[in-house]
Image (cartoon, rainbow, N blue to C red):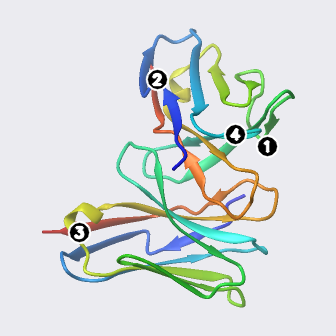
């Protein structure tokens, strides 16, 4: 069954603006990961945050995790047209496979 | 970083034929690989877990006789879509990860299957 649920499902912003995507999940997790997928391509790992971490940064990416609310957010700062893609959160519990949310389709307009 | 190679990247086949998709982990041994299916504008749905040296574990609703999985070595898993039909047309993606659960999964580039 689907574990993560992202919102919004689609987001359109101007280049230079920040983009925020949220993910909620239902069961306990070991970690939560964000992936990016360009149209018709495989997934690229962006960032992993463990269940005992609250915030993590990687370049223009900032991920937060609130295990009490079972939610996470991905912030992309100073967005670029090349950031246009679908973004998925995936949750993992020890020894189990990843469960992906429905994804957020981000469009960054030049 | 680790790389997972998936082949072919796209394939068109006639209805009733079988198609084999390969997934290779290039620089680490993967005792477990995963096969996902993705419909347009939708998320990835896990089809099955491929276990090296043993039978695959299929998710509910996935026909094991139709989607044959073989994980003959620590670096290769194959998915064979048997007697393909147009409704099997989809994007298939494999992934592999190290045994440490706190590491990322590495994904193949996906295979676009079109059954005509």
Q: Chain of mark 3?
A: A
Q: Is residue A82 above or below residue B113?
A: below
| Residue B41 in sight in this render | yes
Labels 1 and 3 share a subunit: no
Q: Which residue is mark 3?
A: A108
Q: Secondary structure at mark 2?
A: loop
Q: Of the residues under marks 1 and 2, which one precedes in the sequence?
A: 2
Q: Which residue is mark 4?
A: B33
Label 2 to label 4: alpha-carbon separation:
17 Å
Residue B43 relative to residue B66: left or right: left
The nearer-to-camera label among 1 and 3 is: 3
The nearer-to-camera label among 3 and 2 is: 2
Q: Which residue is mark 2?
A: B8
Q: Is residue A96 above or below residue A104?
A: above
The nearer-to-camera label among 1 and 4 is: 4
Q: Which residue is mark 1?
A: B60
Q: Residues within 10 Å of mark 3 (few under 14, many from 20)?
A: many
Do residues under tags 3 and 2 come within 8 Å of each other at their CB atoms? no
The nearer-to-camera label among 4 and 3 is: 4
Q: Which residue does the image show at 62% across and 48% down from the upper left? A: B45
Residue A8 appears in which quarter of the rendering? Answer: bottom left
Q: Nearer the viewer, residue B7 or B79?
A: B7
The residue furthest right is B54
Q: Chain of mark 1?
A: B
Labels 2 and 4 share a subunit: yes
Labels 1 and 4 share a subunit: yes
Label 1 to label 4: alpha-carbon separation:
18 Å
């Amino acid at each position: 069954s689907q574990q993560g649920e992202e919102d919004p499902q689609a987001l359109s912003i101007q280049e230079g603006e920040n983009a925020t995507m949220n993910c909620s999940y239902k069961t306990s997790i070991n970690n939560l990961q964000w992936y990016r997928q360009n149209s018709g391509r495989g997934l690229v790992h962006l960032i992993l945050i463990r269940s005992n971490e609250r915030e993590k940064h990687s370049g223009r990416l900032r991920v937060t995790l609130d295990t009490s609310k079972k939610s996470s957010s991905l912030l992309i700062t100073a967005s670029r047209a090349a950031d246009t893609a679908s973004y998925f959160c995936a949750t993992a519990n020890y020894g189990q496979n990843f469960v992906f949310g429905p994804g957020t389709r981000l469009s960054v307009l030049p | 970083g680790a790389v997972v190679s998936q082949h072919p990247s796209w394939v068109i086949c006639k209805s009733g034929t079988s198609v084999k998709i390969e997934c290779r982990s290039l620089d680490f041994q993967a005792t477990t690989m995963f096969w996902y299916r993705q419909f347009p504008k939708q998320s990835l749905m896990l089809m099955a877990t491929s276990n090296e040296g043993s039978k695959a574990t299929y998710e509910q609703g996935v026909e094991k006789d139709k989607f044959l999985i073989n994980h003959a070595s620590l670096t290769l898993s194959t998915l064979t879509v048997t007697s393909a039909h147009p409704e099997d047309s989809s994007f298939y993606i494999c992934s592999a990860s190290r045994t440490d659960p706190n590491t990322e999964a590495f994904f193949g580039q996906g295979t676009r299957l079109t059954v005509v």
